Image (spheres, grey):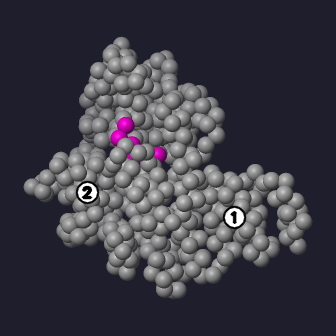
């Protein structure tokens, strides 16, 4: 996208591009977890783009390389956000939905960037003690069905659920909080934006100060709030030259689209009340389409979506959403064309290619399966750590009778989930089936060596020749 105006003008009403539940791989019924308070990680190309457009200038002002800061969209109604030292920033959907303007959300991002830039030690040290690798699953909506038959993968994810508990237990000192406030205000000023939004956000939850710890939102348990701190921040931002700067119409519109998308997906019943049929605006129709989809009414969702596509034929996310709905409701052949359109319109989006690849390998046509393999490989060029893409690639190789390649792809899947034992087992199997000295065989060997091999594994490697003939 060459400009924010173009992004808003032609991609509005964008579909639910690869929203997914981390916990949903455990069983088909787990898709309800987003609606009953369960925690999930969500991937959505459009939302990620909006968040990065908001956050990247702030990261740069903070002296951080925007390419190295990964935004985690956490599907949780709890109001919370967190930062890990120089690596990741997590934003709960509950927090995003509570922000009234883009400037308020940017204020929170700027504050968290203050923790990152200030090298506040608690996140890095305590998360390292947790010994867990954050798992980022890139799933299309229909991938849930593909993973439902993988209880081993579900068990791995369930075993790492304590990762989120570790995040919830972390907390900053009041001194660190004040420093992050001041730094965040400076970052916003450096990007020509007002710090007013951060003050407004804190003001909206000033009452949390009088609650005991157990009754506070998670964000204000880990980020202690006080009236003195709010007033000190207000005094700071009111003196800055850009205090009166406001969000642009495009930024406001994007923020509403993001909230509508999340509301429709996470709170579909609420979305249908909030976004009434009489509201013909883009966000409202978009939210209703997703809500009907989530409530197992695909035909109603598709009717709304077709109207939106008629108005925005060059919107890749609308096509992607249509393909996803058709795929998930077992209309796989019909899903192919809209997903092809989505990829043609946005060829660099890995998530869209993964969804197309998933559909192609689901058609059980050898030529389509081969094409699906190509789409998944292209997606992995951009997201080599995408566990779901590796999972789907393993399925495709199984269909093609390429047992060694399938086991290697499964090893890659587990390796990128941080499940080193499973990765090692499948890599060892792959080495037995792959031709020695090939790049694939050597990659399987690398995974074994990087996955805490047992003495027995090392003896087996040595016996057959670690590097082949």
Q: Which stretch appears magenta?
A: 72-78
Q: Residue at x 41, y 70 (%)?
A: 343
> Which of the two residues, 42 or 228, is positioned nearer the viewer here?
42
Residue drawn at x 61%, y 43% is 132
Q: Give the residue displayed 63% in from the left and 51% down from the top.
A: 418
Name the element at disc 1: helix
Query: Mark 1 highlights which residue?
Result: 426
Crowding at label 1, few (<14), some or many (≥20) Cα neighbours within 10 Å?
many
Q: Is residue 74 magenta?
A: yes
Image coords of residue 251 (percent x, y): 28, 46
Quarter of the image for residue 150 reads bottom right
- Image coords of residue 143 (percent x, y): 45, 65
Q: Residue at x 31, y 54 (%)?
A: 265
Whole-percent x, y for residue 15 in the image: 31, 61
Q: Residue furthest top?
A: 228
User: Could you tell me how many numbered marks the image carries?
Assistant: 2
Q: Which residue is mark 2?
A: 291
Q: Is residue 106 above or below residue 382?
A: above
SS for tag 2?
helix
Depth check: give the residue in front, 381 or 59.
381
């Amino acid at each position: 996208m060459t400009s924010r105006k173009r992004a808003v003008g032609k991609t509005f009403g964008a579909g639910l591009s690869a929203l997914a539940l981390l916990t949903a791989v455990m069983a088909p019924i787990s898709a309800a977890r987003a609606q009953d308070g369960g925690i999930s990680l969500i991937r959505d190309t459009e939302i990620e783009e909006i968040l990065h457009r908001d956050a990247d200038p702030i990261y740069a002002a903070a002296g951080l390389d925007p390419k190295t800061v990964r935004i985690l969209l956490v599907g949780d109604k709890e109001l919370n956000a967190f930062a890990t030292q120089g690596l990741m920033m997590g934003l709960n959907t509950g927090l995003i939905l509570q922000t009234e303007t883009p400037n308020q959300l940017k204020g929170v991002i700027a504050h968290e960037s203050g923790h990152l830039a200030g090298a506040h030690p608690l996140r890095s040290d305590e998360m390292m003690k947790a010994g867990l690798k954050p798992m980022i699953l890139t799933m299309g909506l229909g991938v849930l069905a593909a993973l439902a038959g993988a209880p081993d993968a579900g068990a791995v994810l369930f075993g790492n659920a304590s990762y989120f508990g570790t995040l919830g237990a972390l907390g900053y000192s009041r001194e660190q909080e004040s420093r992050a406030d001041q730094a965040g205000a400076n970052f916003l000023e450096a990007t020509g934006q007002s710090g007013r939004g951060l003050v407004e956000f804190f003001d909206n939850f000033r009452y949390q100060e009088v609650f005991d710890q157990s009754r506070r939102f998670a964000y204000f348990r880990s980020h202690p709030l006080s009236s003195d701190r709010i007033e000190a921040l207000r005094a700071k931002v009111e003196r800055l030259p850009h205090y009166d700067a406001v969000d642009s119409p495009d930024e406001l519109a994007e923020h509403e689209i993001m909230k509508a998308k999340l509301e429709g997906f996470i709170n579909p019943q609420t979305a249908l009340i909030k976004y009434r049929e009489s509201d013909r605006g883009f966000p409202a129709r978009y939210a209703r389409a997703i809500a009907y989809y989530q409530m197992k009414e695909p035909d109603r969702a598709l009717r709304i979506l077709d109207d939106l596509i008629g108005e925005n034929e060059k919107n890749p996310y609308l096509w992607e959403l249509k393909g996803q709905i058709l795929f998930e409701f077992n209309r796989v052949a019909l899903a192919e064309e809209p997903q092809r359109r989505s990829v043609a319109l946005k060829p660099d989006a890995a998530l869209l290619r993964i969804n197309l690849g998933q559909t192609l390998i689901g058609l059980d046509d050898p030529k389509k399966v081969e094409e699906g393999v190509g789409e998944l490989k292209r997606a992995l060029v951009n997201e080599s750590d995408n566990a779901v893409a590796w999972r789907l690639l393993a399925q495709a190789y199984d269909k093609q009778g390429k047992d060694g390649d399938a086991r290697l792809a499964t090893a890659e899947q587990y390796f990128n989930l941080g499940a080193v034992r499973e990765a090692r087992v499948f890599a060892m199997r792959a080495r037995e089936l792959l031709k020695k000295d090939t790049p694939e065989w050597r990659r399987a060997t690398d995974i074994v060596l990087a996955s805490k091999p047992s003495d027995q594994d090392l003896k087996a490697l040595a016996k057959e020749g670690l590097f082949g003939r």
